[in-house]
Image (cartoon, grey):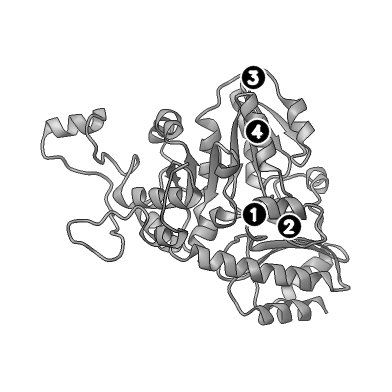
Amino acid sequence: MKKNKLGTNTNLIRGGLNRSQFNETSEALFLTSGFVYDSAEQAEAIFKGSKKGFQYTRYSNPTIETFEKRLALLDGSEDCFATASGMAAVFFSLMCQLRAGDHLISASALFGSCKEIVKNILPRYGIEVTFVDGKNINEWRKAIKKNTKIFFFETPSNPLLELIDIKAVCNMAKKHRIKTVIDNIFASPILQKPVLLGADIIVYSGTKHIDGQGRVLGGAILSSTKFKENILKPFLRHTGPSMSPFNAWVLLKGLETIKLRVEAQSNAALEIAQFLQKSSKVEKVFYPFLKTSSQYTLAKKQQILGGTILSFKIKGNKKNAFKFINKLKIFDISNNLGDTKSIVTHPATTTHRILNEKERLSLGITDNLIRLSIGLETVADLKKDIAIALK
């Protein structure tokens, strides 16, 4: 972990700042694919690595580098590599360190595309996979084999906000020399810092809270500098899941306000979760900072706030869920999350549609499950919108 004496807000505004010779106020946007050199000797030295400099935007770029440094400061990790999307971050954080014959253990509760990667894509390369109930520490222990290389999980999980004890799982992994890769997208680096609990690699979708305004795609892999330089960077430089400088610039501007947004949205989400609990039309509410949650103690231990997303089961079936969704006036129907605009999602038919019915039901993703991503609108307006739709 980097030692940094500056406060979070200061780092979010000034972290990684790299002004050009023009001394611009806002971060410069370097829209260039390549770079030129003063001499052939300089080009040779930069490509060889004996001299610092930029080679090609697929490798690195001043704007992208500033974003990487700022996010690393926020996350608490030593280093960062920006990617084209959150799913690129997930896939390449795994593939850069796995070989045919290796074994990966994953929590069962995963976002649909993450589940597809682990369940169907990794085995194509001769990688063995075991799924466990992430909440059960004994299941992780029992699944370990001599060839186990990675523990992979997301916490809170999408869409039921299931929590995994990060410190307990990471401690176990270290005893067996297993790397932990944690998807921290739901919590964001504002509310939860897995690196402080022993995580090796953390992945983010910049599309969510980091941008938080529905503009661009982006992802990031956070790790130690040693892991980035020796394992991650050589793999990514040649496979090319690079972030565009423009997207990096937009995400930089998003980082300036992420703390203000996520904290306000999380406070609103808790209020709405408590509001939904009181409704006779609601079967169950899923939100880690509800005192009725079975994982409330763990949530308070590893998260600052409960997060911007909540889910609930409306009484009835798919027809009732759709009717509620269609009645909402303020909430947008979309599959995104962490946005300043409030969003409603039906996981079974969108984000987790790729799972078969048996898989969905085993994870509790029923046809009456609805996910809400709470934005920055007036909370009273959101509650009124929900109340009217529930009627």
Alpha carbon distance from label 2 to label 4: 23 Å
Amino acid type at image mark 2: Pro
Whether the residues at callouts 2 and 4 have beta carbons within 8 Å, the answer is no
Identify the mark at residue 288; answer none if there is no mark.
Answer: 2
Occupied quadrant, residue 231: top left
- Residue at 77 percent of width and 62 percent of height: 290
Q: Secondary structure at mark 1?
A: loop
Marked residue nearer the N-terminal end (2 or 4): 4
Marked residue nearer the N-terminal end (1 or 2): 2
Q: Nearer the viewer, mark 3 or mark 2?
A: 2
Q: Is residue 214 visible?
A: no
Q: Secondary structure at mark 4?
A: helix
Q: In the figure, 147 relative to 90: above or below?
A: above
Marked residue nearer the N-terminal end (1 or 3): 3
**Residue 38: where, in percent of width, then height?**
11, 40
Alpha carbon distance from label 1 to label 3: 32 Å
- Residue at 40 percent of width and 61 percent of height: 10
Q: Nearer the viewer, mark 1 or mark 2?
A: 1
Alpha carbon distance from label 4 to label 1: 18 Å
| Residue under label 3 | 147
| Residue under label 4 | 171
**Local crowd size for mark 3, using a 10 Å CA cut-off: few (<14), some (14–19), many (≥20):** few
Amino acid type at image mark 4: Asn
Alpha carbon distance from label 1 to label 2: 9 Å
Q: Is residue 155 visible?
A: yes
Q: In the figure, 96 relative to 369: above or below?
A: above
| Residue under label 1 | 303
Residue closer to the observer: 282 or 124? 282
